[in-house]
Image: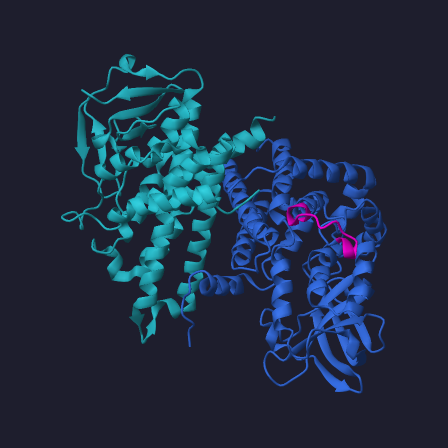
Chain colours: A cyan, B blue
Amino acid sequence: MDMELTGEQQLLVDAVETLGTRWQTMPPGHERDYAFYAADLQAALAEGGFLRAGLDMGMLEAGLVALEVSRLPVVTSIGASALVSAALLGDVFSGPVAIITSDWRKPQRLLPVAAYALVLRDDRALLLDMAGVTVEAVSSIYGYPYGRLAVEPDWSSARDLGEGSGALLQQWARVALACESAGAAQSAVRITVDHVKERFAFGRAIGSYQAVQHRLAQCYQISRGMRFLALHAAWSGDPVGADIAATYAQDHVNKLAFDLHQFSGGMGVTCEYQLHFFSYRLRALQAELGGADGAATAVYDRLWKTAA
Amino acid sequence: MEFAWTADQQAYRAHVRDALDELLPDNWGTHYAPQGYGSADQIAFSREFGPKLAERGLLVRHWPAEWGGESADPWEQFILAEEMKWRGEPRGPQYMNVNWLGPTLMKHGTPEQQQEHLGRIASGNVIWCQGYSEPGAGTDLAALQTRAEPKGNGYVVNGQKIWTSYSPFADFCFLLARTGSGRKDISIFLVPMDTPGIEVKPFPGLVGDGHLNEVFFTDVEVPGSARVGEEGKAWDIITYALSFERVGIPRYHVGRKLLDRAIAQLDREGRGNDPIIKARVGRIVAKFEAARLLTYVVVDQRAKGAPPSVDANVSRITASEACTDLTNFLMEYVPDCLADGDAILREFHRGNIAATIAAGTYELQLNMIARGALDLPRGN
């Protein structure tokens, strides 16, 4: 057991951070968007071999990459590419991947930009090539681009990933959302802490009030818990670890979203302040795969009902 | 980062489990464990059980060889603690001795103090109490009023401690007393509890047996050789000891076992498939697992010789929250445990009220995180 990054892992994280420097602020012209999909970052991650970290180094390292990339305000399909594709296909696509686990008629995260979709259908995972599939963009204030399939695809044309693939897709989608949530939470806490140190109210820094400090300390605690549970789930490949990481992450979004926006005050509802990129991304992830209730129920069923 | 246990660590865990299977009597789970480790029965049991652990090298294995250990990795100490907690902590109050008291004396005690006390702790039959809290000083420990006035080569102690778990049965007290006028002019003394002038008065309370006591010090003469560290300079030593105490008890580890008991009862009552219960329990498991990993962060730092960090506070509050969530769940879904139901669950409930207060309240931990991790400015 070693809870610190190894030298190799630190180099990997540093490399992701260096690569991400360009995208630490929104690109010109998109500063006031609700979300920005950074195709060039996705390409750079592919070119740099970062999407293959799970295949070349290990799934823990893939989790680290996903978490670090998710600290940026721009989005990619890092979780679906580096974690889910790697685990299900033993391969990754350089282009963006969407994950569809709800009714195909509903708006899906990343669908407008996806080259492929991994689809959960009747307990099996299907790999759908999005070439030729019509997607209608959906206007959304979540931190990702959303789209909807215009017509039901010909599922028989999709590649069936076989027996057990549906469960595997759910598992790794939960790991991915946990890693992405952990990265977003880390940045959201950082932005808010920076703000309350600089912003004064009633003659004092907002961050000097104990009422604020205590809740921010809890937000920090949550982000730490998210981080280690997500990375542990990536490392273990254990389905219950994925359910646990997703439960913890999704269960704590309400607290983060409320407190961090609360302490950011009026600034937090402007688009020039970056908090919404992370808080709305957390909101989007909070709802996936049945949310905290769905993941927590899965934890219970795996730990107690399977043994019965 | 590597989450796997090594083969040696896995073997050690199996070894501890086997030893406990062998050493614990058949009525441990039904008679002793439900009484809690401050009870007279469990303390008496621990005086017999400690030497058996010591004989097998399972009490202070993490201590240096010089003091009876094998310089084992701190991870082994935690594996041992997890397995002990899982069984209901048959070491009783002696967990304190080996977790923080001994290490504190190794670092700050005089050679004579080390000689006198470490061997006894390592032999497994000595009980200590900690003289910290007072009627007017709990979490704000520096507000303590008990005074140690110099007299000849020693001191005379007057004052009152409160809470003071295990004091009715303790052989020694790790006593904090004021030796100067400054707020942190505090010294530590190692005081035999049979010293004339010490009176212990247990009083009833909500926590488990043996925990709530008043200890009165009236003209108690303490030799200068009983002082740990320099006079009035104990604050750093206290901080060091408290950092061990905050993550000394692996409560996260017992959470799953308690949920097993609660769910077995709910199954018997035909309620084990309730979707609300499932979602609630899954959340509690997730928080316990977060507490486990955050505690491992602290253990890892200790294993690497790093100084105490704010991660101990993060670990502490996460474990406190998980235990509180579990307590709340028990009250809503297994309420008979407070009456004639499961005694182990009742003891957990009783102990948990204290867990969010002891070693500094939940709010104090948040203060320390706000400073140590977030660097937030102090208020007026």
Can residue A52 be seen here? The reply is: yes
Q: How many marks?
A: 0
* Residue sticking out furthest to the left: A29
Please say if B179 is above or below A83: below
Q: Residue at x 76, y 60 (%)?
A: B210
Task: Judge from the rendering whether residue B132 lies leftward or rightward of residue A131; answer left or right.
Answer: right
Q: Quadrant of residue A109?
A: top left
Q: Which residues are magenta?
A: B65-77
Residue B229 locus on image (x, y percent): 69, 73
Please say if A212 is above or below A271: below
State yes or no: residue B277 in magenta.
no
State yes or no: residue B68 in magenta.
yes
Q: Residue at x 86, y 51 (%)?
A: B48
Q: Residue at x 59, y 49 (%)?
A: B327
Residue B202 locus on image (x, y percent): 77, 66
Residue A66 locus on image (x, y percent): 37, 39
